[in-house]
Amino acid sequence: MTTASVEPVEYRGILEFVVEDVGVAPPRALVLAVHGFNETGGALRADITALGVPVRVVHAYAARPISPRAHAVSEVAGYLWYFTGDGGLIEPVLFGDNLRQLEALLLDMVEQQRPTLTTTTTTTTAPVWLVGRDQGAVLSLALAGIWPELISGVVLKDLPRWWVADWTPPTSSRAGQRVVLVNAADVDGAAGALRALAADVRVCAGDVDDGVWLMA
């Protein structure tokens, strides 16, 4: 599988993003990719390619660099989505702001970039997936809970233990949503919580190649 095309960097609110078609065939899903701590947009390209399904990817870039002086230091490339404290405590202001920014980006991309799937008899819209690593996995998990009726597939890599002060994650039913957990810090707890909300959960220990499973 190869990368078909990469579009220029675009902007939505405080976020930068790049739209990329991955695969040699027409894309069969729209993917929002949310990178991890000390990474930048495009860091999940290999993981998405490993899914084995041609997709259209929106690579989101966090707006805040690891170092507050990194705006003027080109060799510092890593970014973060939020700050953390002891025991996985997430500072709620930056977390909430970026969750809102990602939600707005997702809804815009669903309207503007979502592929259609055409057969000889039908035309339907492609499914929408989230792929996130580390901090990006936390945000993807939260966003998938806010929009379970829109997001049918979620791949969470290196999901840490986490909680947000004064905020309760969404508890809406995730029936019909498929979630792949790869190297989660508390895999039993995460899988159990998702299954309690009716999500279909698959637990993996290494690289993901479940694109066909997510499409089902």
Image (cartoon, grey):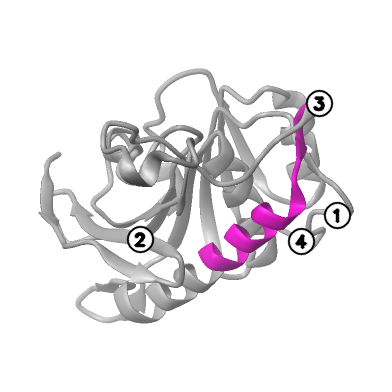
Say which element carries label 1: loop
- 94 inside magenta stretch: yes
Mark 1: which amino acid?
Answer: Thr
- Circles 2 and 1 in contact, beta carbons < 8 Å: no
Point out the frontmost of discs 4 and 1: 1
Q: Is 150 colored magenta in this rendering?
A: no
Q: Amino acid at mark 2?
A: Glu
Question: From this viewpoint, is residue 24 visible?
Answer: no
* Labels 3 and 2: the sequence-earlier one: 2
Does residue 2 appear left or right of residue 97 in this picture? Answer: left
Nearest the camera: 42 or 65?
Answer: 65
The boundaries of the magenta stretch are: 87-102
The residue that label 4 is drawn on is 173
C-alpha span from label 2 to label 4: 31 Å
Image: 184 above or below 91? above
The quadrant the N terminus occupies is top left
Identify the disc placed on residue 168: 1
Specify few, some or many for label 1: CA neighbours under 10 Å numbering under 14, 14-19, or 20 or more: few
In the image, is residue 87 above or below residue 97?
above
Q: Earlier in the sequence, mark 3 or mark 1?
A: 3
Closest to the camera, between mark 3 and mark 1, is 3
Mark with earlier residue (2, 4): 2
Q: CA distance from mark 4 to mark 1?
A: 15 Å
Q: Residue furthest top?
A: 205
Q: Main secondary structure of the magenta part?
A: helix
Depicted 44 relative to depicted 178: above or below: above
Q: Which mark is residue 87?
A: 3
Residue ranking furthest to the right: 166
Q: Which residue is mark 2?
A: 16
Q: Identify the element where label 4 is drawn.
A: loop
Q: Amino acid at mark 3?
A: Gly
The mark nearer the N terminus, 3 or 4, is 3
